[in-house]
Structures are given as C-alpha cells and as structure tokens.
Amino acid sequence: MSDLLLVIGNRNYSSWSLRAWLAMKIAGLEFAEEIIPLDLENTKERLAKSSPAGRVPTLRVLGDGDGAPDKLVVWESLAIIEYLAETYPQARWWPEDANVRAVARAVSAEMHSSFATMRAQIPMNVRATGRNVPLTETSQKNVARILKIWTDCRRQYGQGGDFLFGEICAADAMFAPIVVRFLVYGIEMDDVTSAYADAVWNSEHMKWWRAAAEEESWTIPDEEVGLAD
C-alpha cells in the first residue's frame, strides 16, 4: 500500500486537484485518493481537518500503521509537485535539460499565480458542453498570454512530442484545467495551440479523469456558467 494520500475535490470542478493528480499520474506514482465534495454542508469542516489552508488538493504522507499521525502534510498543487519531484527524482516531472526545466517551472509558476480574472469568469467544468461566456477585456488578455506561452513552448521545446516540452510533464498538468476551459467555452485557437489542447484532452490519464467526472452526481450551481437561456 502506498504511503501517499491525495485529497481532492470534485473532479468536475476542482482545477487545482486535477493539476496535482495529473502530475502524479504522469510520474507513475502509486497513491490513494480521498474526495471531499465541494459546496456541501460539511465541506468546510472536512477541509479544515485535511489542510491547514482549508482547500484541496492536499498531499498526506501517511504514518506507519493505523492511527499513526501523518509524517507530512503538503498543500498547494505546485508545492506538492515540487516536493514529490525531490522525493521521487527517478520519475518524470520536468524536462531533463536544466535550461528547459527552468522555463517549464517558470510557465508553471506563472500559471499558478496568474490569470485570476479569466479563471473566475470561466470556471473549470469538465462535463459542460457548448457554453457561451463573453470574455471581459482582462480575460481576453489572460487568454492571449496563455496561448502565447503554449505557442512559444511548442515551437521552441516541443519537438520531441505533442506537449509543451515534447514529452508530457508537470507543466502540462498545470495547464490541463485551462485546456478544459478553452475547449468547453469555445476559445478560438490556431493550429498549434489547438493541437496541443487536443493532445492534453485525449492523453491517457486525462481521459480517465474526464470519465470519472462524468460519473459524479454533485453539481455546484455557481460554477455552471454560460448556459443557454
């Protein structure tokens, strides 16, 4: 049994959960999962017990034996990825070349800290189809910056595969929820960025996550934006 437990939210809505989960799957790690459904009466209580920040995802390194205290609790997706990259360096997390790895970390950190306006206006919703949300000027600038990141990475570093840095890595996991948004809300993309989005959308573990999201029964009304009148 793995000593790693990843606590996540609804697969349909929890973009940060997807980032950590997908990076761990790409790396080939074995880990257990616990889902805390969001927006329920007991959600805040359960999150408070699971994470110092009261959010998902949270990585728990379990103690030895039943009832033993956790050895470590790590919250925030990028912190989880970096901790695991140090703990399991033999797995694929980042590009091998140091300079390329620095760029991959830079765009991942930018994703982590930026694009708040766009992310709030078009929340991740894996099950949604045909949504229409007119973007604000700030959201449009967010979209343009993301598409430039994808284009630059694909053209400069992506020759070895279909992903930002060739082979799929943690940087692609960081942008996976954006891929969901762009496809669901019909964001216009060119051939380069559309091919990248399609590669992420149809990657092995992403397909599994999408199928699992389809099976969930939870719905968060405030996240269901862009529905036709």
Image (cartoon, rainbow, N blue to C red):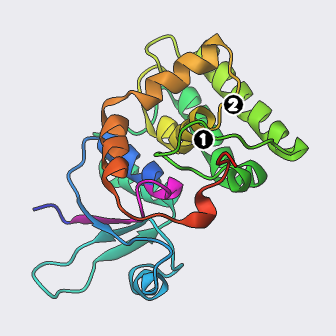
Horizontal side of residue 182 vs 198, given as left or right? right
User: What is the quadrant of residue 11 in the picture?
Assistant: bottom left
Task: Label 2: state its secondary structure.
Answer: loop
Instruction: Give the farthest residue toward the front.
Output: 229
Specify the quadrant that holds the N terminus.
Answer: bottom left
Q: Say if residue 175 shows up in the picture.
A: yes
Q: Is residue 119 left or right of residue 30?
A: right
Towards the viewer: 4 or 117:
117
Left or right relative to 71: residue 48: right
Name the amino acid type tagged 1.
Answer: Arg
Residue drawn at the location 70% of the way across and 40% of the way down: 132
Residue 128: x and y in percent read 52, 44
Residue receiving disc 2: 187
Residue 216 image-quadrant placement = bottom left
Residue 149, given in percent of the width and then of the height, sits at 69, 29
Q: Earlier in the sequence, mark 1 or mark 2?
A: 1
Label 2: few (<14), some or many (≥20) within 10 Å?
some
Residue range (magenta): 4-17
Viewer-closest of 210 and 130: 130
Q: Is residue 186 magenta?
A: no
Q: Do callouts 1 and 2 mark residues in contact (Cβ within 8 Å)?
A: yes
